[in-house]
Image (cartoon, rainbow, N blue to C red):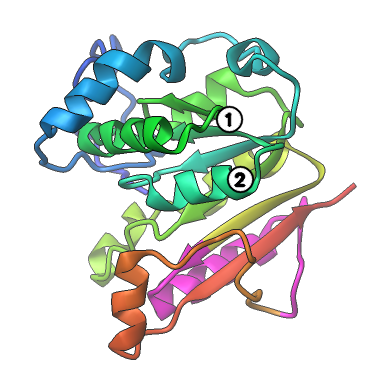
Amino acid sequence: MDTDTTTLPAPSGLPPSDVAHPKAIKSYVLRAGRTTSGQSKAFAELGPRFLLPYQNTLLDAPAAFGRSAPLILEIGFGMGDATAHIAGVRPNDNFLCCEVHEPGVGALLKRIGEQNLHNIRIVQHDAVEVLEHMLAPASLDGVHIFFPDPWHKKRHHKRRLIQPPLVAKLAARLKPGGYLHCATDWQPYAEQMLEVLSAEPLLHNSAADYAPQPAYRPLTKFENRGLRLGHGVWDLVFVRRP
C-alpha cells in the first residue's frame, strides 16, 4: 500500500486525476516498461472490446460482459499469464481485471486473442478507485490478489497492499459466501496477510491457517523459479460471512 503524499502520474492513455488524494490507499506503483509491437497491435484490435473505461458510476457487469455470470475481481495481474489460464479453465465466470502497467495490459490483450477468451474485461486504472466507485456492496463473487509487491524493507511495509482499510473495502463488496484469494512467495508478507485477513470481522478463513493451492491457480514462471530455489508459496483463501 502506497501512503506517500506524492500524486503518481496517470497510466498511459488515461487522463490525470483532477484531485490529489494524499495518504490514499493505492494498489500499484508505476513501473517502467516498453510495449512491444504485438502488444500495441492487441491494444488496437482488441482494446475496444475488452478494455473498460474507468468511471465514477457503478459498473453494469452484465452489459460489460454481455452476460450475467459470477464476477471475480483481479487486482494487479502482471503480464496476465495466470489470468488468462484461470479464465480459460473457468469459462462460466466473468473476470474484471485491474492493472496500470501498459505492457502487462497489452500482454493480456494479446493472450485474450491467442486463446479466444471472452470472459475477461480490463480496467487500466488503480484498482482501489475501481473498487470504491465502480463496484457496489455485495457485487463480487471473488477477489484474486496474486503476488503483490512484498516491499521487503521494514520502512516500506506501509506500502503493502494487504492492509486493514483495503481488506474492509474488499470484504464489503463480496457477496456472502464470496471469497478473497491472496498468494505470496514472501513468508513475512504471508504472515501479515494472515493477521490482517483474520482480523476482518466479515471474513473467515477457509483453512486452519494457509490454504492448499486451489487447482485453478497455475504456477507462474516466477513462482516456478522461486520453488527451484527453495522459496515457499503461501495461499490464503478467506470467505465472506453470511
115 vs 133: above or below: below
Count of all numbered marks drawn on residues in the image: 2
Range of magenta residues: 183-208
- Say whether residue 230 is left or right of residue 201: left
Q: Is residue 112 visible?
A: yes
Type of amino acid under label 2: Val
Residue closest to the far bottom: 230
Question: Eyeballing the image, is 208 above or below 165?
Answer: below
Image coordinates for residue 59, horizontal then vertical, percent: 60, 15
Q: Which mark is residue 143?
A: 2
Task: Tell which of 101 and 193 is nearer to you.
Answer: 101
Classify residue 2 by image quadrant: top left
**x, y percent for residue 232:** 43, 83
Q: Magenta stretch containing residue 73, yes or no?
A: no
* Residue at horizontal 27 percent and vertical 20 percent from the top: 43
Q: Which of labels 1 and 2 is toward the front?
A: 1
Are the two marked residues, 1 and 2, in contact with CB atoms closer than 8 angstroms?
Answer: no
Left or right? Give the position of 129 relative to 91. Answer: left
Identify residue for label 1: 119
Q: Which amino acid, mark 1?
A: Asn
